[in-house]
Amino acid sequence: MLVRFKVNGRGFGIDARGNERLLDSLRRLGMKSVKEGCSVGDCGSCNVIVNGRLVNSCMMLTIQARGSEVTTCEGLGSLESLHPLQRALADAGVPQCGYCIPGVLMTAKYYLDNHPKPRVEEIRDILEGNICRCGAYTKITQAIVVASNQSRRRL
Amino acid sequence: MHELPEFEVYAPSSLGEALTYLSGEGRGARLLAGGTSLIPDMRKEGIRVRRVVDLSGLSNLRYVRRTQNTIRIGSLTTIRELTEAKILDDRYCCFKRLEHSFGFVTTRNMATVGGNLAAGADGDLAVILLALEGRAIIRNAKGERTAEPTNLALAEDEVIVEVQFADLKGLVSTWFNKFEKRNENGKAGITTTTVLKLKNNRIVEDVRIAVSRARGKESGRVPGAESELRGRTADAESIGRALDKVESEIDPAGDYRGSPRFRRRVARAMVKEGLAKCLEELDHERGASQC
């Protein structure tokens, strides 16, 4: 069936099978930042923002995203102009294997959108939903704090 | 891990359409609300499904409202919407606690009240509603019925549309506790909900204690423990007797996550904390809630 939704501000119509997950459709549309990890909502590698809500795209059928506004990592910034979160993670040397990073970025963006003055404990709490096999949590947390400080300075 | 089976999805635009479909050509279809139970079940357990009804578009079933003295929660309300509902004030710490104990933020953004109830009688919402003496409203194409939250007995053409409970009045507080071995998103070893209502002089006017796996795998109230407190002063002595009753009265089933003895001890500790938190909340001035 034809499902229409927006991804990073651009409209798409996709012919999706009934059992097609949003994760599969986004990757078909070229959003390769969206990664499949555990497939059951435990690891956060596939996290995207749908209508302002952080969701696991592995547990959402494409049809459930009909008419929605989806944001993936591709919508955060570009190579020429990185989003403050991307810049902070790169500057801190966070990515090792890098597989979890797009999911971490979407979690961090969702968190900072809703909590402009984050506390370190809260950042650690919210990262429980993102599994990083390289164990880079300390650097990830520091980078999110740096990004939030930069955002506040700009305000 | 299994592949998702091939299935057709029907996306009704109204509850009426969904009920008509379920009573006719869609008989036997599985309901999909938040997806946090059905999708993992299909992946982990290999459940075969031919038809799925996507209820997520029925936005008129997403609400938390008070009608006279009854709180009504639409079945498609997400856990996040529930924890943020303004109507559920400091007296309803039991719901606010889900912010800390119900899965990850993604799970709370996706999972729904109706979906959690339908997923099993030992789910978090079932144990909370048991203590709040709530009920589920269930509909099919022919009509409506009410059911206990722990005994829904859903037929294949039925949909949970709402949960209701009497609004709490007076000096009352509630608390929800959950023990799980994983930090988040695990299966609960045991959960408890405590509702405590005091008279002005710290005499217990009413108390309700609900425990998952109170009898085998069934959730239930602990009437013996409640009667140790009702009408008495809420002090260390009466609470101690009530906790002894909790431990002796429940008979939880054991599994790899905990033996019956372990679960009894954990339930005791969680009810102890629940009562202490309720008393603490009642000592706070309005607006200074810790939940």
Image (spheres, coloured by chain):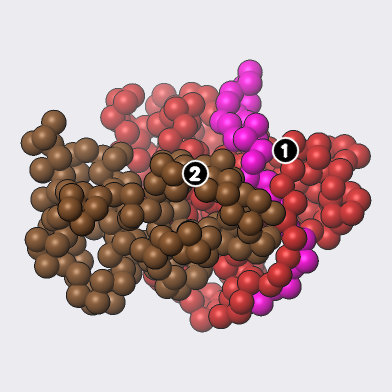
Chain colours: A brown, B red
Residue B51 within the segment the image draws in magenta? yes
Amino acid, disc 1: Ser
Q: Which residues are magenta?
A: B46-75
Task: Identify the image quadrant of the N terminus of chain B.
Answer: bottom right
Point 44% across, 48% down: residue = A7
**Residue picked out by circle 1:** B13
Residue B117 in picture, x, y percent from top left:
64, 52
Residue visible at 60% across and 79% down in the picture: B2
Give me the residue at 63% from left, 59% from top: A16
Cα separation between marks 1 and 2:
22 Å
Q: Amino acid at mark 2?
A: Gly
Instruction: Give the image location of residue A90, x and y in percent.
Output: 14, 62
- Disc 2 on helix, strand or loop? strand
Mark 1 crowdedness (10 Å alpha carbons): few <14, some 14-19, many ≥20: some
Residue B137 seen? no
Nearest to the observer: residue B32 or residue A82? A82
Parent chain of label 1: B
Could you tell whether A65 is left or right of B80 in the image?
right
Asked if residue B150 is among those painted magenta in the image, a careful observer would answer: no
Instruction: Using the image as rendered, state which of residue B178 and residue B228 is in the foreground.
Output: B178
Give the farthest residue toward the top.
Answer: B68
Q: Nearer the viewer, residue B289 or B115?
A: B115
| Image quadrant in which the C terminus of chain B is located | top left
Q: Is residue B126 left or right of residue B183?
A: right
Residue at mark 2: A11
